[in-house]
Image: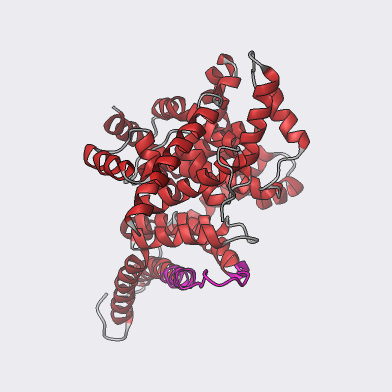
Amino acid sequence: MAAADEQQLVLQVKDGNHGAFRVLVERHMKQAYNVAYNFVNDHDEAEDIAQESFVRIYHAIGTFRNEAGFGTWLYRIVTNLSLNRLRQRKNITRIDGLEMDRFISNMATPFDEHHRKDTHRMIERALHELPTLQRAVVILRHFNGLSTKQVSGILRCSEGTVKTHLHRGIQKMKVKLNVVKHELV
Amino acid sequence: MSTHSHIQQQLYDYAKAELDLQAMEQINQHIASCPSCRQELSELDLFFERIGGEFPKACDARSPEFWDNFADSTIQRIQSSEHAVKKSSFGFWDSVIDSIFPYRVSALGLAGVMAVAILVLIFWPQPPSGKPTIVAEQSAAVDTSVTTVNQQFESYLRKSKTLLIGVTNMDLKNDQPIDFTAEQKASYELVSEARLLQNQKPVMMHSGQLLGDLEKIQIELAGIDPTNPGPRIEMIRQGIREDNLLFKIRMAESVYGHARFMSAKGSAPGGKK
C-alpha cells in the first residue's frame, strides 16, 4: 500500500481534503497513542500527545516533503512531544508510587494479576531508568515494532546509532530485569 | 568497530530474523565459534520471553468507542486551534474595539465605511499635473515591499546560519555542563520570524522549502531540555548534516544578496526601473 497510497492521501490533505486527513488519523492513531504511552505512562497524556501530534501535522502539512514517509514524521513529532512532556514533569528517571498505581489500574490483567503487576512494574521502571536516547530507541524499536530505518528517521540519527543505543538499552534492561547477573559498565 | 562489536549490535535483528540471508549466515558462523555471543543471544531470547508476551498495547486499554471518536475529537481540536489563532491575531484590537464600540457589528460596519472612504480618496481621479507621480509611487511602494521582505529573509538566514554553526561546533565531549540558554532563546525568536516570513509570497515562491526545514530544526532546538541538552543536540546536528542545511543557507544568501544588489543598482540615479 502503504507508501504510494499514503503519499496520495498527503497530497489530498495539502489540497484541503479533510476526509483524507481523517483516513490518515484513523490509520496511525493507535500506534501514535502506543508510542506516546510508552514514554509518558499515562492514558490521558498519551491521548493528548497523540491528538496534538495530528494537529501539528495538519498545520504543517504544507511543508512536508515525504522524504522519510508520513509515519516517520508523525512518530518524530510524537516522540518529541512525549520527551517534552516528560521534561515538564521533571521526573524522567523515576516513577512515583501514585503513577505506578495509576498505570497498574489501567491494565487489564485477567491472569495471575499479582505476578503481572510486578512484572509490568519492573519493566516500566527499567525502561524509565534508561538514558533518554536509549529509552526512545527501545520504545520505538522494541515496544512499537518500528524498523531500524524508521527509528533512525524519527530520531534523525544513523541506523548504526540506533543499533548501538538499542543494544546498550537492552543490555541495561536485562540487568535490571535479572536476565543477567553482572552489572553493566 | 570490531567484528565482534558489530555482530553484537546485529544480534537483536538476528533474533528477530530481520536480517538478509548473507548477514544471517555471517552471524551464524560467528556464533558457532564465539561463546560470548552465544551467551548474549540466549540472554536476548530470555529477555524477549520475559517481556515480549507480557506487554499489552496501551491502545487496547481504550474502548472501541474511544477510537471511533478519536478522529472527530482531533478534528474538533484543529478547528478550535484555528479559531484561537484567528482570535489571538486580532486580540488586542478586538479589546480596543469592544471597549469603544460594545456592538461588534456596528464596529465592523464603521470600519467598512472608513475603508471605502480611504479607497475612494486614494483612487479619486486627480487633475493631470504632467508628472506620473502616483504610478511611480505605487511602483516604488511595491518594490520597497519586496525589498523589505528580502531584507527580512536575508537577516533570518544570517541569524539561522550563526545559530546552526554554533550548534554544529559545540563541544559535547567534555564533562562541563552545557549552557544552551542563548541558543534556545535565539531559536524561539527565529521560529517567530520564520512564521511571519511564511506569509510572505516572495519568500515562499523561492525558498519555502528551506524556510520550512529551518523552522523545524529551530523548533527542535527550542524544545531541548536545558538541563541535559547533549543527546538532543547530537541528534539535531545529525539532521543539519544530513539535510545539508548550511550549504542551502549559503546558496540562498547568495541569491538574495544578488537580488539586493540588482535592486540597489536599479534604484540608483541613472539606473533602470
- Does any portion of residue A77 appear in the rendered image? no
The residue that appears at 48% across and 61% down in the rendered structure is B234
The image shows residue A72 at horizontal and vertical percentages of 40, 41
Q: Nearer the viewer, residue A31 or B55?
A: B55
Residue B107 higher or lower than B128, as above or below: above
- Does any portion of residue A23 appear in the rendered image? yes
A164 relative to A48 in the view: left or right: left
Assess whether residue B22 is covered by the magenta stretch.
no
The image shows residue A138 at horizontal and vertical percentages of 50, 41
User: Residue B147's quadrant in the figure?
Assistant: bottom left
Task: Say which quadrant the C terminus of chain B sits in.
Answer: bottom left
User: Residue B104's quadrant in the figure?
Assistant: top right
The image shows residue B27 at horizontal and vertical percentages of 30, 43
Q: Nearer the viewer, residue B65 or B260?
A: B65
Residue A145 higher or lower than B35, as above or below: above
Which residue appears farthest toward the bottom when viewing the image?
B269
A165 relative to A65 in the view: left or right: right
Assess whether residue B179 is covered by the magenta stretch.
yes
For the magenta stretch, what is the residue range?
Answer: B154-182
The image shows residue A152 at horizontal and vertical percentages of 40, 48
Residue B173 higher or lower than B239, as above or below: below
Which residue appears farthest toward the left when viewing the image?
B22
